[in-house]
Amino acid sequence: MKKSEQTKAKLIEAVINLTNVGQKISVSSIAKEAKTAYGSFYRYFNNLDEINASAIVQVVLSAAEVVDNQMKTEKSNLFKVYYSWYIAIDLFESDYMANWLIDNPASINDAWVLTQPMTSQWLQDAIFQEEEPELNKDNLRHFKMAQTYIFWTYQNALREKLKGRKSIHVYTDLMNSVNLMNLSQKTQKKYIKKVADYIK
């Protein structure tokens, strides 16, 4: 990694670290946390909104990579899709992180869009392998359409977590209210239960 790329990565990591502990995000606090000169910030970012967006993408893509690796031995691709949405809700455990995302809705929506190819491929594989009798290409079309709308409800899921509700309860409510893949209620409940059992 080039020195310039290292500096940019350090600045983004500084934002994540500061957010995790509830510290105020400013150019000064970022530069101090990253151990870089104040002026270095403006070589890579025009403002705080830009670095916040980059940091949110970094957090989401890192989580997606962890899920992808964690699910390497999982045989059910459909389960992978359901589990990935649980992780999306459970990912931001601290109130600071949740508030950070609520304050930057466009950035979190853009970040989730980057994970669509991974989850769409899992669903395609589930259809190809006929994991459920009802699965077909219509489910994939519905999934791609529904993902755009579920991103809007993600902010509400974060607010529910801020009230102290457990991730699995928020996840269950979200999945039951938004049938991502247009599956039967029986199949939907089966996979939600599988996720709940898996995380115990």
Image (cartoon, rainbow, N blue to C red):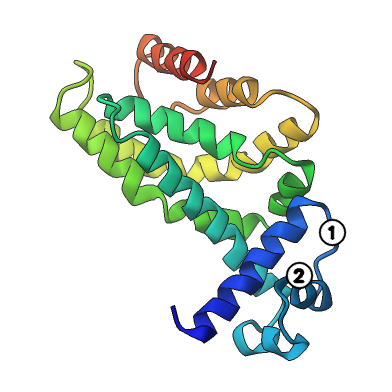
Instruction: Determine whether, in the image, residue 93 is placed left or right of residue 195.
Output: right
Tell me the quarter of the picture where residue 105 sits.
Answer: bottom right
Q: What residue is pinned by disc 1?
A: 23
Tell me which numbered mark, 2 or 1, is placed earlier along the sequence.
1
Residue 123: x percent and y percent?
28, 35
Report, in whole angstroms, how far the alpha carbon at label 2 lies from the one at label 1.
10 Å
Residue 33: mark in rendering: 2
Residue 34: x percent and y percent?
70, 73
Q: Residue furthest top?
A: 186
Q: Residue furthest right?
A: 24
In the image, residue 176 sits, relative to residue 190, either above or below, namely below
Instruction: Determine whether, in the image, residue 64 is placed left or right of residue 31.
Output: left
Residue 171: x percent and y percent?
58, 26
Tell me the quarter of the picture where residue 170 sits.
Answer: top right
Instruction: Name the residue: 84% across, 59% down.
Output: 23
Q: Amino acid at mark 1?
A: Gln
Cβ atoms under marks 2 and 1 closer than 8 Å:
yes
Instruction: Determine whether, in the image, residue 182 is placed left or right of residue 140.
Output: right
